[in-house]
Image (spheres, grey):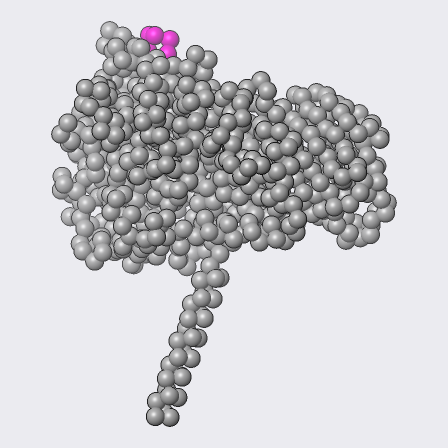
């Protein structure tokens, strides 16, 4: 009996030890530690390696913060090759092309007070810089000051560590184009607002901010267009600012500043300050790390290649920044927002800073798979955007912007509903997509459907109606119409109401040229444009050429196969994209960065740095040669994504290019959002676990995984052999296990049946 008890104790002790080890492992899993926010920052106007900046922020946070190396108003706010920092900027910039709004900066200095951005700038080194999503630190050499910052959703805390000095200052730059600032010494406080923006705002737009320091001011000055006015406490000017100072600091002495802002009012900014008020710097750091680990931890990756882990989690970080939450919490604890569409303060959700032309492709499908509760809120925000402006946004920053083409809000709305999003007025969004398909915004041609009259009449947009990018518009409108049809069908709308969109979904056929097997510009009389150079980046296309756009039939690859005559012909055209030299078409117009980025990647006409062709490698799955998709997808991941400052091959674009990688690394991709399917690729990791929001777990294991074994030899789903070249969303959401057996040679017998091909509209019975 005694031996039995001792054995039991040993077993129990072993179990406790095992449990503690497992618990320790679980607690030590910290995916945010793999994130490098500097990926993509080695960019410039002429060449994008991401066009990103280090966003020190909470996931989907209202305010981001970033060190500022660029000048005021420069869209390239932080570039890796810069050597001086001019301030620490609150930013809402989605891309340098759209630039910023709701911005101001803070900068510590020593010695004589100085405001000019060039004179206050300090040399810095990446060797003395720590960059994490929830924490930033840098040593400012010229001032001998270490600046640290940590964010909340709408606020931040700064910690400045000064040298021994008789005079230390903190500069608050409210920027030009109209700003206001007020120093309130008795409260150690500064308040102000800025109005600088890049468009997309009502006339009453302001970003109100409040800054509270942990000590009193020994020096106070307001700044009027660069002129420092000692002991002046208030300034309203084209370019207002303030400087506050502290005397006789000891070396290592720290100054804390708590910051928050609001698009609603000073009073609301004070409410937002509660996010950091009464909390220490280190407490906010800890909260930020926990939050990021919760978000990134929805995907648990195991792999021996540290660089791949860094790339993956950095891409997942970028995929969870935009669209940002534009709402605030009022004194009653209710969610409200300043409307970037009509300037009113209204109840409910609002999200912004995303371009659907980019993000409909994989960013929003990724949200639906991994963060569906966030897209529930975003769809509610779209309902409000429609109520407040009469249109769904296509590019919002923060309101409607004149950028890109298409009516891809229909895809975002349809895919959300198809994947079970809830808690919003879907019927009102139906009204919104129908309205958007048949109307154009009176002031913003990118919103609604520009050229809808001629498109609805002819079934395509011709080259002779003063509507440029006509081939691209026709292709996008056809896919958008299919999205509307899918949405209407899911809502139970009568066929009499939705059949017109099913018909228009086939309009892509109207610009197909059988002679070249490409999509080609066409005149109103039905004749194709001549001469025709498929490699030319001409005005018929958007940031691309015929090779990029001719495969943009997301919803009906089988229909495109039928037009080309056979699967063999279709695959030959796909092959050709990678064969035609990249220099072809380079002289067709003045050089733009997208052209240069394609050229230097040396993958023929494949231009992964821009969105239209990113789905194209997956199309081999529709034509019985899935192994080619596996090969090219892995080539793209391995070659074009790196955990380095030049780690992207073009614009990162608000999470779209990152979400492409996240999906592809998992082993599948949403070629046709709203179809409910993901198309098979080549998983990059040995083991992945998706912790789904519904409580289920999806495991993805890839045996024999290594850099050379890019081909899928076989697939099992929950232990059963699986031959199809796609997975269904509804099945993945049940959890379970996907098992890939990888090999260094293709299995040309797998996935070649017609029934193995993914969704195509042509195969559906209407």
Q: Residue furthest bottom?
A: 2
Question: Is residue 617 visible in this depiction of the protein?
Answer: no
9 vs 725, nearest the viewer: 9
Tell me which secondary structure the magenta stretch mostly adopts: loop
Q: In this orientation, which residue lies closer to the viewer: 751 or 446?
A: 446
Is 611 one of the magenta-colored residues? no
In the rendered structure, the answer to whether residue 739 lies left or right of residue 201 reads left
Provide residue 543's location: percent of width, then percent of height. Answer: 41, 24
Is residue 376 in view?
yes
Q: Is residue 514 left or right of residue 284?
A: left
Q: Quadrant of the C terminus?
A: top left
Residue 387: % across, % down? 42, 22
Which residue shows up at 24% across the image and 31% down it? 490
Residue 174 falls in image quadrant: top right
Q: Nearer the viewer, residue 342 or 660?
A: 342
For the N terminus, which image quadrant? bottom left
Where residue 311 sits in the image (x, y, percent)?
A: 45, 48
- In the displayed structure, 258 sits above or below 250; it is above
Give the residue at x 45% y 20%.
Answer: 389
Q: In which quadrant of the rendered view does residue 506 lie?
A: top left
Q: Position of residue 507 (x, y in %)?
A: 23, 19
Who's the residue at 77% across and 27% down the image? 234
Q: Which residues are magenta?
A: 462-467
Residue under the image location 25 percent in, 10 percent down: 457
Q: How many marks?
A: 0
Horizontally, residue 299 falls left or right of residue 701, namely right
């Amino acid at each position: 009996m005694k031996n039995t008890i001792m054995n039991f104790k040993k077993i129990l002790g072993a179990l406790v030890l095992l449990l503690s080890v497992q618990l320790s492992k679980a607690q030590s899993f910290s995916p945010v530690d793999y994130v490098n926010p500097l990926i993509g920052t080695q960019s410039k106007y002429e060449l994008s390696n991401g066009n990103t900046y280090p966003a020190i922020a909470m996931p989907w946070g209202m305010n981001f913060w970033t060190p500022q190396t660029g000048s005021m108003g420069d869209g390239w706010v932080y570039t890796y090759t810069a050597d001086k920092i001019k301030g620490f900027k609150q930013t809402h910039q989605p891309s340098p092309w759209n630039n910023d709004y709701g911005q101001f900066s803070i900068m510590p200095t020593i010695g004589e007070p100085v405001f000019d951005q060039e004179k206050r700038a300090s040399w810095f080194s990446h060797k003395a810089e720590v960059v994490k999503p929830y924490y930033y630190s840098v040593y400012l050499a010229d001032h001998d000051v270490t600046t640290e910052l940590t964010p909340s959703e709408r606020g931040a805390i700064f910690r400045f560590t000064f040298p021994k000095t008789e005079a230390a200052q903190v500069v608050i730059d409210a920027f030009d184009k109209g700003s206001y600032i007020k120093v309130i010494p008795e409260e150690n406080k500064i308040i102000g607002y800025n109005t600088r923006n890049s468009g997309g705002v009502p006339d009453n737009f302001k970003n109100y901010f409040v800054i509270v320091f942990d000590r009193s001011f020994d020096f106070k000055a307001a700044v009027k267009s660069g002129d420092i006015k000692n002991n002046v406490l208030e300034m309203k000017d084209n370019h207002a600012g303030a400087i506050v100072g502290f005397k006789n600091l000891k070396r290592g002495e720290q100054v804390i500043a708590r910051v928050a802002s609001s698009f609603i009012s000073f009073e609301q900014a004070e409410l937002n300050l509660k996010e950091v008020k009464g909390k220490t710097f280190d407490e906010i750091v800890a909260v930020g790390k926990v939050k990021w680990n919760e978000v990134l931890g929805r995907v648990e990756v195991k792999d021996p290649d540290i660089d791949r882990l860094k790339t993956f989690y950095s891409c997942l970080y970028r995929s969870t920044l935009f669209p940002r939450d534009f709402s605030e919490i009022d004194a009653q604890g209710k969610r409200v927002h300043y409307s970037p569409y009509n300037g009113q303060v209204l109840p409910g959700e609002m999200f912004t800073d995303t371009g659907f032309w980019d993000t409909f492709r994989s960013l929003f499908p990724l949200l639906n798979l991994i963060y569906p509760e966030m897209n529930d809120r975003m769809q509610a925000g779209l309902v409000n955007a429609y109520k407040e402006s009469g249109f769904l946004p296509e590019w919002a920053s923060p309101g409607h912007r004149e950028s890109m083409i298409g009516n891809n809000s229909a895809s975002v709305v349809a895919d959300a509903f198809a994947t079970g999003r809830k808690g919003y007025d879907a019927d009102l969004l139906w009204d919104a997509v129908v309205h958007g398909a048949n109307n154009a915004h009176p002031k913003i041609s990118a919103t609604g459907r520009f050229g809808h009259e001629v498109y609805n009449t002819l079934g395509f947009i011709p080259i002779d109606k003063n509507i440029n990018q006509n081939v691209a518009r026709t292709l996008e409108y056809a896919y958008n119409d299919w999205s509307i049809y899918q949405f209407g069908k899911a809502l139970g709308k009568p066929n009499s109401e939705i059949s017109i969109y099913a018909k228009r979904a086939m309009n892509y056929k109207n610009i197909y040229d059988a002679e070249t097997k490409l999509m080609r510009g066409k005149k109103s009389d039905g004749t194709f444009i001549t001469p025709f150079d498929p490699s030319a980046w001409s005005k018929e296309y958007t940031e691309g050429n015929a090779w990029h756009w001719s495969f943009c039939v997301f919803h009906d690859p089988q229909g495109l196969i039928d037009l080309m005559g056979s699967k063999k012909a279709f695959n030959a055209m796909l092959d050709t994209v990678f064969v035609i030299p990249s220099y072809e078409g380079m002289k067709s117009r003045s050089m733009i960065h997208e052209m240069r980025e394609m050229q230097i990647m040396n993958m023929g006409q494949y231009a992964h740095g821009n969105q239209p062709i990113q789905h194209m490698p997956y199309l081999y799955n529709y034509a019985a040669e899935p192994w080619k998709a596996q090969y090219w997808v892995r080539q793209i991941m391995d070659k074009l994504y790196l955990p380095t400052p030049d780690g992207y091959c073009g614009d990162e674009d608000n999470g779209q290019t990152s979400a492409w990688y996240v999906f592809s690394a998992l082993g599948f991709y949403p070629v046709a959002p709203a179809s409910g399917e993901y198309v098979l690729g080549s998983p990059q990791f040995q083991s992945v676990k998706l912790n789904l929001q519904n409580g289920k777990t999806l495991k993805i294991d890839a045996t024999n995984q290594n850099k050379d074994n890019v081909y899928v030899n076989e697939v099992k789903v929950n232990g059963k052999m699986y031959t199809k070249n796609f997975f269904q969303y509804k099945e993945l959401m049940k959890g379970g296990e996907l098992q890939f057996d990888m090999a260094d040679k293709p299995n040309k017998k797998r996935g070649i049946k017609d029934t193995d091909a993914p969704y195509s509209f042509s195969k559906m019975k209407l």
